[in-house]
Amino acid sequence: MILKHTTLLLFMVAMLATAHAQHRKTDPQTHKKGFVDHKGKVLVPLQYDELPREWDSIMVAKKGPYLGLLGGKGEIILPFEYQELRLHLLRGGFSLVKKKATPWGIANSRGELVLPMRFESVAVIGPNLLAARAAGEKMVQVYDGKGTPLYQLPGKTVEPGFDDNSLKILGHDNKSRYTDLKGQPIFPETMPNARWTDGDVIISGSYNDYGLLNFRGDTILALNHRAVQPALPGQFTVSTIDNNHGVVDKQGQTIVPFDKWQIFTYEKFYRVEDYSHKSGLFASDGQVILPKDYQIREPGVYPPYENEPDAQPKRFLLVGSEQKPYLKGFYSATDASVILPIEYKEIWYRSIKQPVIASKESPSTAKREVMAFDLTGKPLLAAPFPFISHTKNPRILLVSRGDNGLFGFLNLDGDTSKTAFTLRYVTELRPGIYSALQDSLAVMMTPEGKRLYAGSPDGLIRANDAQKSLFEKLPGASGELLLVTPKPGSGLIGINDEGKEFILEESASVPKTAPVAPAVPSVRDIKTDPSASETPTEMPNLPVKKEVEASKQQGVEEVAEIITIEAPSIEEKIWEAEQVDTPPQFPGGLDSAAVFFQKRLKPCEIMLQTNDERYWHTKLEIVVESNGMFTKIQSLSSFGNACNRDVEEVAKRMPRWMPAMKDGKAVRCRYFLTVKHREK
């Protein structure tokens, strides 16, 4: 069993390593969907009405009224002739299939019908265990993964039990009982309500009457609790009728005291969280690791890196103070050990292979200091910088000294004192490829210093979706279009991810815009603010200048580095979204906007306190300028609350939008965006 699970885990990691490079794409004319890789190469043709949001090695797809099964390269595994199709990828890749006028059957990952379509109910119990019952039969037949009959069990249905070695059978009397994988009963007949066991104690009960027994039938914990669940070895989380939660051991002794909080079980400790979202940590012996005064959650991994197999944010905890100056720490989610103490303004995590980046204010100068650490908390640099950001290469960081607006790529494996600071206006075009100004040239380069392209800095801008679509139709086009620039005598030039130039048609729209933005921290990253984003904010694509300003907040002298953004030229007319040819768009579309907000919004308590859906969303009015920046962000909700203010604050940190287009020209446009509040 361990070997099987290890093989499955390695298979999943391999699939994830490939999956993060693929994304779903929709044909704007036919609205059909498919998948392409990061270079734009078609993997699954754009000819399906429905596809999963994420690419996988096996996927359910819809074509017309019927469902079928596709492989990761677009090959058809099951033909498109099924009315219902339910894929169990983590249980051997089996699918439950049903045509319009037929009963159910089961197909394997190669598209072969292992069980024919003649059963009233079917189930995939595990990677090599299936179950089915024909109409009118009193017995459920259990099969192996090849469809060979093993044994029969009396009942309606069979499904996975409380662990990998048990089955749950629903009888014709609608009562559940449990057997092992060979069909032998686990619990004595005198315990019809038994639900779980470790071979020593038993969780038994029904609705609001759960408790703990031993195999002799002696009561360890009275059968009058709302829920009892296995937790750390030899311990159980318990919920009382009056909604208190605690932890007890096998003898019924209290480990974590009962209170009005939720309890989350980790590998070696517990996290408690009350209804105001304040959390604390308890050791397995009941000792308090952290009192219930903190915001504790797994660190967010900012797009597009959240799907990388090495991200693994569940291995760590971000711990935030609930009181000014709202400091953060970084803990292990394995044993609650401290990696970084609670003394940092912001902490950025990307993956288990990347450094952790953390910022704090210098006690002597009150200026921002940013340091990179390994996952044990050891500093990786001799001294902090005003700005540090991850790159795709785990051993290279983008840094700035802050004195002259210049940036450089710092190699942790080399002599960091020899880092060359020669770059301005640095922007990450896609993971591992950057644009910048260097020595009066516009360049596209990698963090390792390889220059992919160099040209005139005038008019070099990021390619939009229309230009990318045009590029894909060019004969001989290769790679992914990243930049475009007008070139005298040649029209509009596109530059792909290899630095090659391609002539685009003159009809391609080129919105006028300012140069690429410098990767410098925003004011919200510098000044004390509990709602600041946990991820580095992409600055607007506008020229910037810095100045130092002394300010007083609540009687405390504070010196903050202020970034002044030069205002764009603003047209007088504001077009409505219905009046333009193409409305403004968040980078990546509404799905990306939803991910952006959900990763940054605080949980909204009012959603837990009311069923009035007027409080569940915030409607924003946004004016998007012709350069993609926004000059107005305002909540239109008449139900003012902290959740609306949180949405407004997060919206102010949005990246530059794709502007609205009218008659081939980028124009100023009003747009309304509805954002759902975050529950938990």
Image: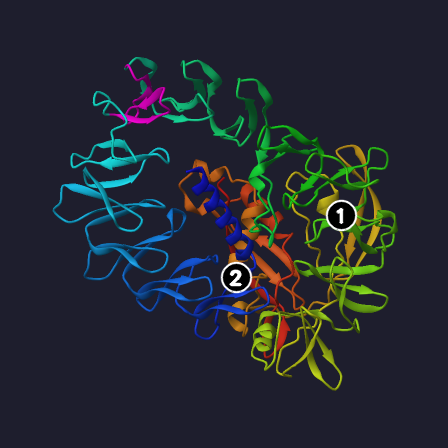
Residue 481: % across, % down: 64, 71
Distance of mark 2 from mark 1, alpha carbons? 29 Å
In terms of depth relative to the viewer, which is nearer, 488 or 571? 488
Indicate which label's residue lies in the foreground, 2 or 1.
Answer: 2
Residue farthest bottom in this picture = 489
The residue shown at (27%, 31%) is 178
Residue 248 versus residue 6 in the image, above or below: above
Asked if residue 521 can be seen in this view, the reply is no
In terms of depth relative to the viewer, which is nearer, 83 or 407? 83
**Amino acid type for the residue under numbered disc 1:** Ile
The residue shown at (25%, 25%) is 193
| Other-residue count near label 2 (Cα within 10 Å), few / some / many at <14 / 14–19 / ≥20 | some
**Amino acid type for the residue under numbered disc 2:** His
Classify residue 637 as left or right of residue 391: left
Mark carried by residue 23: 2
Classify residue 239 as left or right of residue 6: left
Mark 2 secondary-structure assignment: strand
The residue singled out by tag 1 in the image is 388
Classify residue 99 as left or right of residue 608: left
Residue 213: % across, % down: 32, 17
User: Is residue 573 inside the magenta stretch?
Assistant: no
Asked if residue 198 can be seen in this view, the reply is yes
Residue 438: % across, % down: 83, 64
Residue 413 versus residue 262 in the image, above or below: below
Residue farthest left in this picture = 136
Q: Quadrant of residue 491?
A: bottom right
User: Is residue 200 inside the magenta stretch?
Assistant: yes
- Magenta residues? 193-216
